Image: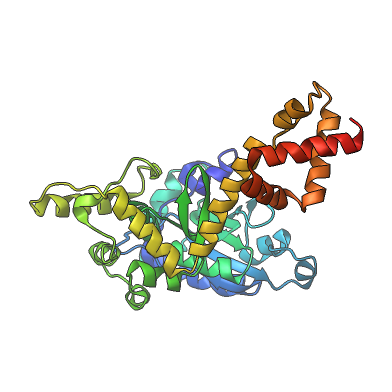
Amino acid sequence: MGGNAFAALLSPAAFPRIPPIVYHTLKSRLQPKILSLYEHVAVPFEAPEKTSHGDVDFIVSCPRDKIARDLKQVNAPHDLVKQVVGSRHANLMEENRTSNFALPVAMDEWRALGHEHEENEARSGVDDGEIYYQESTRNVILHMKAFLVDIHVCMDKAEFDRIVFFHSYGDLGMIMGLLGRNAGLALGEKGLKLPNPPHPPLELSESFDDILRFMGWSMDTWKAGFHTRKQAFEWAASTKFFEPRMFRSHGEGISKVKADRKMYAEFVQWVEERASSSGGPRLTRTDEQLQALRDSALEYFGKKSVFDAMAREREEKAILKQVFSGARVRDWAELGEHWKGVKLIMDGVREKFGGNEGVLKLYNSQGEEGIKKVVLEEQQRLGL
């Protein structure tokens, strides 16, 4: 959201880009303060080769405030956050969402860090000379004229770990998600899922340690960091499912990405250049290849039996809907618009055979005529 959170109060110019040394100084200054409010506080690793920053993103979870813990709230009290970080304006949101806090930049604060010119230029761009930082903690964002601090509050430590991982190194998480989609999978900050349209996706894993092992990415290399974007791109492309000539950045299953995601766009261009330089024709994964990949994911994460059971359940529901529907029972019993009677008969049949599962077993053994027979018997018993 950034400075837009205060569009009615402050000009976008009040939130200038932050030079790296100012960014790191601000982060070091605020982190211990936010740690006094939350048990877990982290800033995702910054994008490689970044020359300026729009905000500081803090990911937090587990408030230290006893009342908040007793009430099972995920937020530290907003008034306390405002006081600790020194915010002047606030746009408050509850639960694990992002609230916005505007923190003013002290006069000449950047001068000691060698950026007096940038601070003066930023102040000259607003009428009152006030600039702000934007800080974020996933659920809390703080701004200061020249600084934006976002605080994202997470529901628990597990979500905290996932958010910190996925939002590290700029757009790398989005790039990983794109490569996952190219392999027929859905990878995001909630973990890895198996798309199954038109049905809901199946959750494969929330553990990025397990996900990286399956995808063929090195967690040790990720932890060591990337000095350049090219290093990050090469790491992303090291997944065992990557083939430049099969790569696609748009189409079914791939979300449109905002134009300001420059690192993401550079990766797409980098892959396209690799595909072109290979000299071979563009390729497309066959349905058989995609199915084999899906099967390998199900086997790796131990979800094949779950997936098969869900498929059987959907199939059984479809059969029941066809052979044991209200309309079918009404026609057999010749009840016209007497829908209450139809419900009584169907409830009676379910009770007699132990629910829909029992009705399905009856169908499998005796077919539709068997279902019709017990329906008419139940109608007779009820005197309808």
Furthest residue toward left: 279
Image spot of residue 114 (x, y percent): 35, 66
Left or right of residue 51, residue 94 in this image: right
Q: Quadrant of the C terminus?
A: top right
340 above or below 112?
above
Left or right of residue 104, residue 94 in this image: right
Residue occupying image coordinates x 23% and y 51%: 246
Q: From the viewer's side, name the closer residue of 38 and 51.
A: 38
Q: How is the image coloured?
A: rainbow
Count of numbered labels shown in the rendering: 0
Image spot of residue 329 (x, y percent): 74, 32
Picture quadrant of residue 34: bottom right
Q: From the viewer's side, name the closer residue of 220 and 297.
A: 297
Image spot of residue 192 (x, y percent): 46, 60
Q: From the viewer's side, name the closer residue of 155 and 63.
A: 155
Q: From the viewer's side, name the closer residue of 324 and 96.
A: 324
Q: Is residue 237 visible?
A: yes
Furthest residue toward right: 383
Residue occupying image coordinates x 82% and y 42%: 347
Image spot of residue 262 (x, y percent): 31, 50
Picture quadrant of residue 139: bottom right
63 above or below 125?
below
Picture quadrant of residue 241: bottom left
Q: Is residue 111 visible?
A: no
188 above or below 210?
above
Left or right of residue 307, residue 253 in this image: left
